[in-house]
Amino acid sequence: MLSLDRDLLSDNSVDLSQLDAQQTALDIRDLSLFYAEKKALSDISMKIQRHKVTALIGPSGCGKSTLLRCINRMNDLIDDCTISGDILLGDESIFDKRVDVATLRRTVGMVFQQPNPFPKSVYENVVYGLRLQGIKDRRVLDEAVEQALQGAALWDEVKDRLNDNAFDLSGGQQQRLVIARAIAIEPQVLLLDEPSSALDPISTLTIEELISDLKQKYTVVIVTHNMQQAARVSDNTAFLNMGKLVEYTDTNTLFTTPSVRQTEDYITGRYG
């Protein structure tokens, strides 16, 4: 097995297949996805536990980022992409024709691999989504900025720089600013697509500590290529390979006593 500090591993023995409605933030049911004729996801079924961190791991090209992008319908932007199956957010299908995609993406926020702040001030980055919602009251915006930056563990570093251009921040600060921008509109779910892979080790540690705090208010789903990181930050882990869900259980079990040989081979480095 992968050599890991057990203290860093989640102590969570819940049977994820048996989560009830109150415990489930997202219910992915028989989800398949095609890019033209190429099948990228095959019959994925899994329940994402509310107010926990769920990690998606697997070799490059296994479908983990594709699955993540399904959750807020980012794949709608790709030509010749077709999806079957369903994803329930609460008790509602995200693919229902009555669903407003812009509203869905406010409910399910997303942070990408590369920090992508807007070419605006720190303040205007955080309030961007709120302004789109028509919120103009300066007091309301000020409070939201402080709360979001505190939630992203960035307030103390930038409270005197709110009018500075976001590009003046370091890479790690920019990524936390993007997280602040995402949580300012109070989503239910936060999707993180390899959020620290472009950062230095110190910034990576800060992001990992932040992720542990974020689950107190949000359900977090993270794609990571770093298995040590998955072990450190997640409560539950899903291993994908070739578009299929191989194994999904609590992180401690998956990394110490996986039930599938393919999982064991991956986490011990026999392929990947």
Image (cartoon, grey):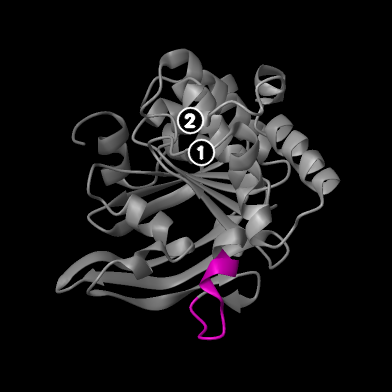
Region of the chain picked out in magenta, as a range: 95-104
Q: State if disc 1 and disc 2 touch (CB < 8 Å).
A: yes
User: In the image, is residue 46 part of the stretch drawn in magenta?
Assistant: no
Residue 263: x %, y % from top left: 32, 42
The three-letter code of the residue at mark 2 reads Ala
Residue lying at the far bottom of the rendered structure = 97
What type of secondary structure mainly makes up the magenta span? loop
The three-letter code of the residue at mark 1 reads Thr
User: In the image, is residue 103 part of the stretch drawn in magenta?
Assistant: yes
Q: Residue at x 25, y 37 (%)?
A: 265
Q: Residue at x 22, y 49 (%)?
A: 61
Q: Is residue 253 above or below residue 163?
A: below
> Dividing the picture into quarters, in which one does residue 233 lie?
top right
Residue lying at the far top of the rendered structure = 202
Residue 50: x %, y % from top left: 66, 54
Residue 159 vs residue 221, the one in the foreground = 159
Tell me the CA gap for discs 2 and 1: 6 Å
Q: Can residue 5 be spotted in the picture?
A: no
Residue lying at the far left of the rendered structure = 37
Count all numbered tags in the image, as a single digit.
2
Q: Is residue 216 above or below residue 31?
A: above
Q: Which mark is residue 251?
A: 1
Q: Secondary structure at mark 2?
A: helix
Q: Residue at x 65, y 46 (%)?
A: 183
Left or right side of 55 for 42: left
Residue lying at the far right of the rendered structure = 139
Residue 35: x %, y % from top left: 21, 68
Left or right side of 156 for 35: left
Left or right side of 50 for 266: left
Residue 266 vs residue 260, the one in the foreground = 266
Residue located beneath label 2 in the image: 231
